[in-house]
Image: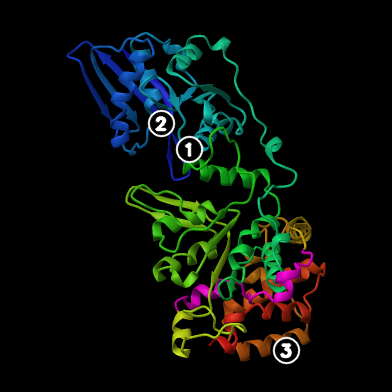
Amino acid sequence: MLAHVLSSAVVGIDAIPLTVEVDISPAVPMWNLVGLPDTAVQESRERVRSAIRNSGFEFPQRRITVNLAPADIKKEGPSFDLPIAVGILAASGQIKEESLAGTVIIGELSLDGGVRPVAGVLPIAACAKAQKIRRLIVPKPNTREAAIIGGIEVIPVSTLAEVANALNLPEEVKPVTQDPAALMPESPAYPVDFSDVKGQANAKRALEVAAAGGHNVLLIGPPGSGKTMLARRLPTILPPFTVDEALETTRIYSVCGLLPPNSALVTTRPFRAPHHTISNSALVGGGSVPRPGEVSLAHHGVLFLDELPEFKRDVLEVLRQPLEDGTVSVSRVQASLVFPANFILVASMNPCFCGYFGDNFRQCTCTPTMVRKYQQKVSGPLLDRIDLHVDVPRIREEELITHPASESSAAIRTRVCAARERQLSRFHGRRIYTNAQMASREIREFCPVQEDTRALLRTAIQQLGLSARAFDRILKVARTIADLDGDDAISAKHVAEAIQYRTLDRKMWI
């Protein structure tokens, strides 16, 4: 007999429909699995055989041929265990074959017949809905993740026997539904807050500007000045997730298998802080079977690179494309994939090898040549793509001991959200959402300056030797500062503040 079971496979961060074809014929007992399966799929034969027997079903002692169609796409992972087992039971007459129509099945099997969760359920559910599939059978821990798509019946199962009952007696099964909007908190909860930070008023102001305009930041200061502490609190002042942003981010985490069991959505801005030994493909995505990297996992959130000069030079250079385009293109022989990577980059670095160049409390032991060599580990083209270079000096004794009252993240987030609303209104009808995303045309249109401001900019270009990209970024930052002040026009004070956030362009650092 022949049975067809609908399933799905994940390619990149999207899913494609697949059909598991099972043929059982009277011949010498043998099992062939074809359709470009990888090692994990090949090993499913032993899991499926044990699961069927330990669930009280009969495993047919005949020739079994399983084809994963289309056959020209490589299949990987254990998510085909369950559809293969269901196909064998249907082809052997133990499950009604007509009940398989319009039903997508995914899941990994344990030897005792239990159904384990798999990665990529969210894009699989979206693919099933696009294919007008009416029903989706998923492992119980993946239920809420699949149900947030809506418009499709999601049936959770824990064992192979439950799958058989759901297919043979569909009227006794109650589908699960989930409204994604109901999962979004009114105010995101974070374990850290800006009120914990002592002093560093200038750095906190710079991070507020970065959050308001979506700008990249480089924090420069001696060890122990609070660079990492500040960076970890940047997500707390970003605007709350919209439902669409949460779904986009959750799709990436679902594919990577990083969504916690029984979770439906990523509801807070992601914060990713990879170690400086990270490889190119781990940072931007890739591999023999391309997977999203850290820049995609930081989508709609923050990517923090601590001790920036310690990263390999070629690793830092691959950041250029995602910083400019907000996407990562990964090309392989089989396919070319595009991963989203719209994030705020926050990097930190010491001013020199010992870390105390320019420190008022401890003398630097580096020579001028060593200072220059250390700073040149970060290339000029990469620095040009970072809007704000911010000094983070050591905290003064008075601020450290007295701990004066500091503004909370909620208060700062209120101003950031107001500035973001001004930007959304300004860019209505365009595919631009923050000032940092403006191209040259938008800069000319939305960043006009008066004559006195032009003179200030002219002086800055002459003295700092700014590139054309750095000049544009000063105007973008000035536009954000004006939005925070509630001003429609960019004035000299806004440009002056934007210029002072170009620490590495000043002569003292050259």
The N terminus sits in image quarter: top left
Residue at (57, 57) in percent of width and height: 342
Given residues 372 and 43, the one toward you in this image is 372
Q: Residue furthest left?
A: 28
Is tag 1's residue or tag 2's residue first in the polypeptide sequence? 2
> Residue at 44% across / 45% down in the picture?
12
In the image, residue 401 lies at what x, y percent? 72, 70
- How was the colour assigned to the protein in this rendering? rainbow
**Residue 340: x, y in percent?**
52, 53
Residue 500 image-quadrant placement? bottom right
The residue at which mark 3 appears reads as 455
Residue designated by label 2: 79
What residue range appears in magenta? 377-406
The x and y percentages for residue 204 are 70, 68
Q: Position of residue 373 (x, y in %)?
A: 44, 83
Q: Are marks 1 and 2 in contact (CB under 8 Å)?
A: yes
Q: Residues within 10 Å of mark 2 (few under 14, many from 20)?
A: many
Any part of residue 446 in sight = no
Q: Residues within 10 Å of mark 1 (few under 14, many from 20)?
A: many
Say what secondary structure mark 1 lies in.
Answer: loop
Comes first in the chain, label 1 or label 3:
1
Kindly state the secondary structure of the residue where label 3 is placed. Answer: helix
Q: Which mark is residue 120?
A: 1
